[in-house]
Image (tube, grey):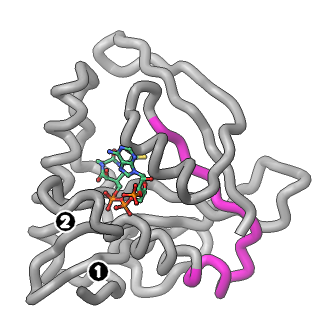
Amino acid sequence: MEISQASEEDRRGIYRLYEQFNQDREESGAGRLGFKYLDGDSPWAEELTDDECVTLVAREKNIVLGFITIRIPRFNPFRKIKKLGEVDLIVVERKLRRRSIGTNLFKKAVKLLKGKHVSHVLLNVKVGNKAAHSFWKKMKFKPMTESIYERKDGVEEGLIYMIKKI
Ligand SMILES: CC(C)(COP(=O)(O)OP(=O)(O)OC[C@H]1O[C@@H](n2cnc3c(N)ncnc32)[C@H](O)[C@@H]1OP(=O)(O)O)[C@@H](O)C(=O)NCCC(=O)NCCS
């Protein structure tokens, strides 16, 4: 397995996993998320720069096994945090979970973020996404705060924000 930045050839594989992510959401009663966030140019940025997303892909024989999308937000709202990075989304192929692919993707993302002098990584997890909670806890993220937002269909969804110093 190799992990490197996503290229155009990975697009279909990433979409396939994104579709699995949406199926998981539907099964848990949450609504689907649009592909909007993958359709723009930004996840395909070649370099991690402020306010652009970079996607790292784990692949074997050109098959995408998982991906992680990270960003450095241009605006950092936390005074005590020197430089903030964010994980937008991580998804590992359903059949291949619990084989450390997620861990390896995250480790590689941290390397990239550290190279850009990021001091802390922020992310949010939907309340009830137990696998993700356990995963981020294992990656040594600490819960920071909780929020509720109203989706377009009027359903309220809870999010837990988690942070880690890298
Ligand atoms: C979260 C996710 C990316 C983890 O990927 P993964 O490759 O399975 O993770 P790893 O194998 O590296 O797991 C590392 C550790 O995290 C914890 N963990 C991961 N999945 C878990 C689960 N389903 N239940 C309990 N603990 C879990 C375990 O401690 C695990 O170590 P172990 O297997 O030695 O016990 C994967 O479950 C996934 O794609 N989920 C669907 C998409 C999603 O919800 N993404 C998160 C959005 S914030």
Crowd class of label 2 (few under 14; some 14 to 19; many from 20; radius 10 Å): many
Answer with mark 1 or mark 2, whichever residue precedes in sequence: 1
* Image coordinates for residue 114, horizontal then vertical, percent: 67, 81
* Image coordinates for residue 93, horizontal then vertical, percent: 18, 60
Q: In this view, does 143 lie above or below 57?
A: above
Q: Residue 75, located in which quarter of the rendered image?
A: bottom right
Foreground residue among 73 and 148 = 148
Residue denoted by label 1: 6
| SS assignment at label 2 | helix
Q: In the visual, does 124 lie left or right of 33?
A: right
- Residue placed farthest to the right in the image? 80
Residue 112 lies in the magenta stretch? yes
Foreground residue among 63 and 102 = 102
Residue denoted by label 2: 14
Q: Do the residues labelled 1 and 2 touch (CB within 8 Å)?
A: yes
Q: Which amino acid does label 1 sit on?
A: Ala
Give the residues drawn in magenta, as a range: 111-125
The C terminus: image quadrant: bottom right
Is residue 38 in sight in this rendering?
A: no
* Image coordinates for residue 133, horizontal then vertical, percent: 48, 41
Q: Residue at x 53, y 80 (%)?
A: 48
